[in-house]
Image: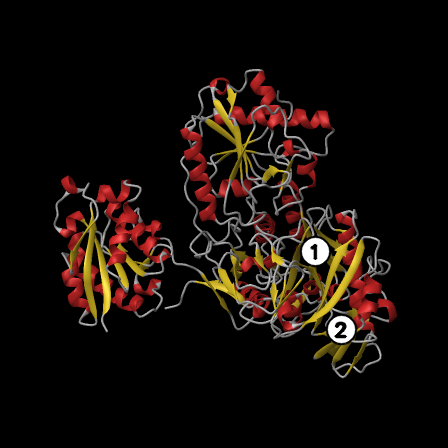
Amino acid sequence: MCNLVSIAKRVGAPRIVTTRGIPYPAGDPSLGPADEKAWRRRLVTKALQVVATPVTAPTVFEVDEHGQ
Amino acid sequence: MKLTRLVHDVTSVALGESTSYASGTLTVSADEAAAVMASPALAEVHVSWASPGDAVRIVKVLDAVEPRTKGPGGGGIFPGLLGPPRPQGRGETHVMRGAAVVVAGYLPRAQEAVVDMSGPAAALSPLGATHNLVVEFTPTPDAAWEDVDTALRHGSLALAVLLADAGLEAPPDSVEELPSVVVPGAPVEGRPRVGAITNLQTQGTFKDSFVYGRSFAGALPTLIDPDEMDDGAVVSGQFGHPGLKNFTYLFQNHPVVEALRRRHGQDLEFAGLMLSPEPVDQDRKELVSAHAAKLCAAAGFDAAIVTKEGGGNADGDMALKMDALAELKIPAVGLFAEMAGSDGTGPSIVVPPEKATGMVSTGNYDERLVLPAVERALGGEEIALLRQKATDEVELPTAVVYGSLSPLGWGRLTCAEPAA
Amino acid sequence: MTTRIVHYLNQFFTGVGGEDSAGTGPARRDGPVGPGTRLAQLLGPEFEIVTTVYCGDDYATTTPTAVQEIMALIKEAQPDVVVAGPAFTSGRYGLACARVVAAAHEAGLTAIACMHTDNPGLDEAGAAPVVASGETGRTMKETLDNLAAAVAKVAAGEPLTRADDRVGKVPRLNRLDDRNSAERAVDLVLARLGGDRRATEVPLPKFDQVTPASPLEDPSKALVAILTEGALVPDDNPDGLESARATKWLRYPLEGMDSMPAGEYRSVHGGFSTVWANEDPNRILPLDVARQLESEGAIGQLHREYMTTAGNGTSVANARRFGVEWVGELRRLGVQAALLTAT
């Protein structure tokens, strides 16, 4: 779960979930507290789906904008 | 607009009753120095000299500034911080060459940074060859660290001006007229137009760079007259990665700018200097990279030399920018430090460019150095994390030596496989 | 004075036996044995193979203490130079040779291994030099010529280079150039403009291929760990995690916690501004929502502790070690999936 996906791909991380900024991989301070926590929940939910998804090479997954 | 440097060579230094400069000797009054550094955030300030060859180690180095002035009180130097943010880079600037104001001491987010004035590490730091007026400080109890940081930055710039003002009446040892960069469309007789892109670290408090006194975070890349750098348009506020640090002294003496000025009119034309932030998210990194490349094309760069500040994250900015330039058919060369592990066998750069693969190595960050014991230490009693006395013999990665892997290209350090 | 050599071989080249003897533990013989006899002749009277240390391939590569035991026998013989192989393309033998010279190099001994460039053990030699062999024992004659020349070179304290048929990782070492990096950058950009499109001081590095783990069947039944390289530690950083060039990782309990409270945890990472992390440490380690998902059944169970390090100028070697140690630890405790936040 990181923002610099190009680095993660380069070093061969198999499952990558895109986050919103280097200093806050599980947050987004531009949102209010409730919205930020909702974002974090979508992010972790996505990550759980991703670890249950088969991949063969470094693969980047984006959180659906209107996901769970 | 042209800038002329009136250079006074500082060949010896002293502390004395009043601050003065005569025939190469710079004398500083400790009381006057403390007065210009005074701030509600600082309880006490102490200055002392550390000169090349002294058995002295400076630890916890924060920033270093070359004494410069354009007139009494600075005359507009360090615009936006000491004076109003008016465009500089014109007229005359007095330079106390061979001296530096060096701030050293504890700030919570700063990483340990070492300068040795003698021994094997002296040649690795720009400050190993300058007479350094070292400023040690005690914060006021309960002062916010952000205020201490601000007070030190303003104070060290004011102190640099105090020192340089001492030379206003002295005849310069040399006069340097800086060349103007070539304008788009001007005839160049077949010489390529080569420009520089300087990425500035912009990651918030204690990891920031100031352009005309403002944080450069959130900005788009912009062109600046290289001579504005000479007058302090860019000031450092960044305390990570000491070996990779672009401190204020290096912005005032930008090595890539100096190298391009020297070759200007000979085998190339200096096409200009661009500043770019290093954003903290991938989207904005891509945005500023694409924008920088377009701006280079508009400014008529035939090629560019790209520099950074910081570690792997900043390498990401380098790679994106160099590849964006390559897409516009503008060859780019980047200055990179290698991070190949202490034995030099690891992958040296985690995010290298994919298309623009011309890279200069400023040395391996991880290779270890043994620094001999010294007689005196300034800046602190201990070397952080080693839990060793600052005067002891110490073994450190090259990364801890201040400016040793200078991304702006100051150093002669490089890295290679052993030759046959 | 002659140069004292200790030669490392496997069970086969020592003449102990083939695959049936691969479990043989480390042992020694006086003087040169097998390929060592010819090597000694090629090296001439200034060198002496004083001892041959050997070990079965299986023992050498699967017993955790094997390299230590082999090194003890080697050190006893007080060598000036340690020579291992040639191992040709033999995988276990190559791995053993590589580990032996890596350990000898670490211990400050001059050491050299010999194997084919495709030997899978090659990269384990670390910074110790490896000289190329042929593919099989049929090339023994040429291989030993190559090895003897390389041994003479390293014994004289000279660096072994690719021109000497060095294979594997060649350390890149710091040195001072005549000119500064900025001036060299100008030359490089002019060379590139002049048409030399490959000119560079830094060859593109090679990275490992990672085989993805097979997917989790059902997160709602799994034990899941949360990890970070965002250097999140208890506020007083009790174990002294480094802000850059980390040499260690740490673990802290999560039992009884529903969230990472501000003021009690902070990031000591030196690679970014930690203001946001310290305002709300869940921005680094998403415990608050992970607990919610656990209580709702979307996560079977959260692992009882988190692991943390600082990924800031951390060498690849250390990062790899942290990864191996984390995986070993998590596997041992039955963790089936891990979510790792990276800054």
Distance from Cα at disc 2 to Cα at disc 1: 23 Å
Q: Amino acid at mark 1?
A: Leu
- Residue C153 drawn above or below residue B146: below
On-image quarter of the C terminus of chain C:
top right
Q: Say left or right for B71 vs C224.
A: right
Residue B25: name its quadrant.
Answer: bottom right
Residue B378: name its quadrant.
Answer: bottom right
Taking depth in this image into account, of B134 and C294 the one nearest to the observer is B134
Q: Say left or right for C244 vs C274.
A: left
Rendered location of residue C18, percent (x, y) = 14, 44
Which subunit holds the residue at mark 1? B
- Residue C190 drawn above or below residue C126: below
Q: Which numbered marker is on residue B95?
A: 2
Residue at 71%, 46% (x, y): give it. B204
Rendered location of residue C197, percent (x, y) = 49, 60
- Residue C175 drawn above or below residue B299: below
Number of numbered discs on residues: 2
Rendered location of residue C151, percent (x, y) = 26, 65
- Residue C36 drawn above or below residue A11: below
Q: Which numbered marker is on residue B250?
A: none
Q: Amino acid at mark 2?
A: Val
Taking depth in this image into account, of C255 and B366 the one nearest to the observer is C255
Q: Is residue B140 visible?
A: yes
Residue at 45%, 36% (x, y): give it. C326
Asked which secondary structure carries label 2, the reply is strand
Q: Which residue is mark 1?
A: B275
Give the mark nearer the N terminus: 2 vs 1.
2
